[in-house]
Image: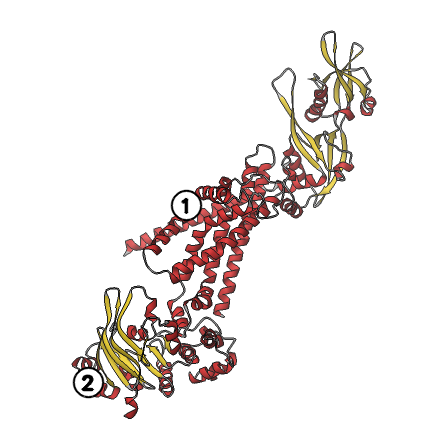
């Protein structure tokens, strides 16, 4: 278990977040370890999506959002003064609940992040490797420019979104219920993919599917009503939960 | 349940009925206007033949009546009419067998005459006084005023008139003056036909001479609707004769004003909408701006005209120029444009913005590469619709002091101008025969222009949609 003792890539310190007067995240302390998969589970409205969107400051755009406490990315405060959220997002990529490809060609979908980040080099090669990492290359290589993101199936679209996020070489990949809009077969493919990705990138995944968390993650965090109830290695959370609320949730008594 | 169902049906029926009725009304209105505009073909054909007509009338001596006739006011040199020897001052009596007592009778006759594009019409006219009669002089015999023929023309001599004859009456119409003598012949020829019984006083004796002073010939000219509309659209305006009225100055004026407006309002409107939708923080200032924009959208166009007059024409010294007109109209459409563009931007899914931001795009990159292209069809539709509103606006430009009638094409931003709606207004309020038809023709062109603009909006929208979806 020595690999688990590594420095956390992302860690939150007493992090709270308010939407106006409603506190959605309450003093969460959580460490996300490098090249591990951390799952955040909990019932609907427990603040898990809010928390994961706080990791790359996507909540900034919602009016009336306030935060306290800190989130550290490799020791740097991402909510600190003078930190450009755009810069944060260049290092921390995200995949969303519903596949949201751009209404452009498959190629342009992947190339967009590279273009705006001023990538110099072989764009086509980079796009190919990103699509390969997302296990999509073989399915789309013949019509990279002919098909748009919308022409693909739901599962392909989500893998395209993963490729898009991977293309800019992020250190962390945030996934907000990436399989909730997909059928079981597409879900299984994405789960395999997530396991493969963990060798090169740190993954934080929000899911309300406990089996999924158990299948893919190394660590699991259980949230309830904005609070982090329990956090630990996945096997321990699912076999020997310390908190009675965690036990109640994973045994299906609520949620 | 059943009650609600019935209510739904009633509402559907009511809404469908209202829609149907308004559609029918619209179609009927357009059809009537188009029919009214029909004479433009024959009017333009008459102008093509070289004749401009004006309405004259003669008071009948001893009665309170006056009799109308159509005088040839202008003959274009080198035209078919000039080739027949017609000239300014002649009176037109008949066209294709139809007696002409006012200009519109002639146009109607031209319009209804058989034949295709090339028509060959018989025309009857009476040349002007000097040619028909010769030189006349007012004199008196024994205290009674009379009209003496001092040197008869060739035509008069051929009819048996001699120098020194006093003209008494033409077909019962008393002759009282030198000019009236000829008019009496014209009116007699028109109302009672030729030959005319001309009563003379020759050396104290009454004599009656039967005389046909009219000239008859075949007038050959082109009567082509397409050509008529085209020349109407592309010729300069002639203030006096409806058959020579042209829409070009007003049309070009409209195009220039709308271009200026587009250049000013389109970027401003989109920038404003992008700011309000994508950047503006939710605070009091933003709320105030939003309320102001909404209020501006409801401002009566006459008020906008006064703003234009005070701010652009006077304070900024633009005068009643194309520039001032374009700026005034841009005030009118800016709020409509902002509202439409905001609506389009609001329909862009948030997930698209998230997707772009999550790969490290700045707000501007997100807007430029994804949000604007996605919203563009909606923005363009709103833009073109507001442009067509501006194109049909007359009130603000009227208050700005734009001219109603312009006979030249504006060349630059500082030139004075008129626009199609103002020109329509000017024509429609004229009392003379024929201008109503000209106004109707201009309305048809305006409606056609608006339809073209809306078609462009639809085509643009479809093109962009296709680009995004396939």
Residue A162 shown left or right of residue B162 in the figure:
left
Asked if A166 appears above or below B75 in the picture, the reply is below
Q: Residues within 10 Å of mark 2 (few under 14, many from 20)?
A: some
Q: Position of residue B333 (x, y in %)?
A: 46, 50
Q: Between residues A30 and B213, which one lies in front from this camera angle?
A: A30
Q: Is residue A142 above or below residue B129?
A: below
The image quarter containing residue B272 is bottom left
Asked if residue B213 shows in the view, the reply is yes
Disc sitting over residue B449 in the figure: none
Q: Is residue A254 above or below residue B171?
A: below
The residue identified by callout 1 is B299
x%, y% of residue B257? 54, 48
Residue that appears at 62% across and 47% down? B411
Q: Is residue B109 left or right of residue B201?
A: left
Please say whether residue B212 is visible from this viewpoint. Answer: no
Which residue is the site of mark 2?
Answer: A241
Disc 2 chain ID = A
Residue B116 sits in quarter: top right
Q: For mark 1, give the secondary structure.
A: loop
Q: Out of B182 and B449, give the one closest to the viewer.
A: B449
Q: Kindly check if marks 2 and 1 are in contact, taking CB atoms under 8 A apart as contact.
A: no
For the N terminus of chain B, the image quarter is bottom left
In the rendered image, which quarter is residue A213 located in?
Answer: bottom left
């Amino acid at each position: 278990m020595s690999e688990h003792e590594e420095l956390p890539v992302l860690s939150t310190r007493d992090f709270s977040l308010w939407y106006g007067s409603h506190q959605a995240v309450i003093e969460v302390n959580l460490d996300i370890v490098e090249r591990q998969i951390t799952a955040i589970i909990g019932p609907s409205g427990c603040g898990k999506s809010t928390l994961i969107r706080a990791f790359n400051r996507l909540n900034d755009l919602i009016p009336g959002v306030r935060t306290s406490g800190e989130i550290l990315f490799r020791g740097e405060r991402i909510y600190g003064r003078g930190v450009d959220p755009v810069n944060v997002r260049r290092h921390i990529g995200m995949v969303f609940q519903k596949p949201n490809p751009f209404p452009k060609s498959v190629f342009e979908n992947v190339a967009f992040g590279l273009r705006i980040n001023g990538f110099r080099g072989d764009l086509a090669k980079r796009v190919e490797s990103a699509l390969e990492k997302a296990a999509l290359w073989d399915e789309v290589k013949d019509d990279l420019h002919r098909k748009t993101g919308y022409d693909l199936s739901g599962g392909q679209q989500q893998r395209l979104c993963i490729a898009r996020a991977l293309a800019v070489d992020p250190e962390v990949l945030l996934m907000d219920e990436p399989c909730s809009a997909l059928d079981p077969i597409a879900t299984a493919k994405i789960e395999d993919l997530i396991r493969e990705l963990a060798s090169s990138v740190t993954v934080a995944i929000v899911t309300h599917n406990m089996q999924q968390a158990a299948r893919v993650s190394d660590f699991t965090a259980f949230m309830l009503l904005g609070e982090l109830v329990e956090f630990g290695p996945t096997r321990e959370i699912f076999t020997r939960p310390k908190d009675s609320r965690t036990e109640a949730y994973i045994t299906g008594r609520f949620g | 349940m059943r009650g609600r169902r019935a209510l739904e049906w009633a509402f559907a029926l009511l809404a469908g009925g209202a829609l149907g009725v308004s559609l029918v009304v619209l179609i009927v209105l357009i059809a009537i206007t188009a029919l009214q505009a029909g004479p433009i073909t024959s009017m333009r054909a008459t102008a093509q033949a070289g004749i401009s007509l004006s309405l004259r009338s003669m008071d009948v001596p001893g009665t309170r009546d006056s009799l109308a006739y159509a005088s040839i006011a202008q003959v274009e040199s080198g035209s078919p009419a000039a080739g027949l020897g017609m000239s300014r001052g002649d009176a037109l009596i008949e066209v294709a067998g139809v007696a002409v007592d006012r200009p519109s009778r002639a146009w109607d006759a031209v319009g209804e005459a058989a034949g295709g594009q090339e028509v060959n019409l018989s025309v009857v006219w009476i040349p002007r006084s000097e040619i028909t009669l010769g030189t006349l002089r007012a004199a008196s015999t024994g205290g009674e005023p009379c009209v003496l023929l001092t040197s008869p023309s060739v035509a008069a001599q051929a009819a048996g008139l001699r120098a020194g004859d006093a003209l008494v009456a033409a077909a019962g119409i008393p002759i009282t003056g030198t000019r009236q003598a000829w008019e009496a012949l014209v009116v007699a020829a028109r109302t009672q036909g030729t030959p005319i019984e001309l009563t003379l006083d020759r050396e104290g004796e009454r004599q009656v001479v039967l005389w046909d002073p009219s000239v008859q010939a075949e007038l050959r000219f082109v009567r082509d609707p397409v050509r008529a509309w085209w020349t109407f659209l592309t010729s300069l305006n002639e203030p006096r004769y409806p058959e020579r009225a042209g829409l070009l100055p007003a049309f070009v004026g409209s195009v220039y004003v709308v271009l200026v407006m587009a250049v000013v309002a389109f970027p401003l409107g989109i920038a404003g909408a992008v700011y309000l939708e994508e950047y503006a923080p939710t605070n009091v200032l933003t709320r105030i701006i939003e309320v102001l924009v909404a209020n501006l959208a409801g401002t009566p166009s006459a008020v906008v005209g006064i703003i234009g007059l005070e701010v652009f024409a006077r304070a900024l010294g633009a005068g009643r120029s194309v520039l001032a007109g374009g700026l005034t109209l841009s005030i009118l459409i800016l709020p409509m444009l902002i509202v439409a563009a905001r609506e389009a931007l609001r329909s862009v899914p948030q997930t698209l913005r998230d997707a772009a931001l999550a790969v490290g795009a700045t707000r501007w990159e997100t807007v430029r590469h994804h949000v604007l292209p996605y919203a563009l069809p909606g923005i363009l539709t709103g833009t073109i619709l507001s442009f067509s509103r501006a194109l049909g606006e007359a009130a603000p430009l009227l208050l700005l002091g734009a001219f109603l009638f312009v006979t030249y094409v504006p060349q630059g931003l500082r030139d004075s101008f008129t626009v199609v709606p103002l020109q329509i207004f000017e024509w429609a309020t004229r009392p003379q025969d024929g201008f109503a038809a000209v106004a109707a023709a201009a309305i048809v062109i305006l409606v056609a222009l608006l339809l073209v603009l809306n078609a462009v909006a639809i085509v643009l929208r479809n093109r962009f949609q296709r680009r995004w979806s396939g």
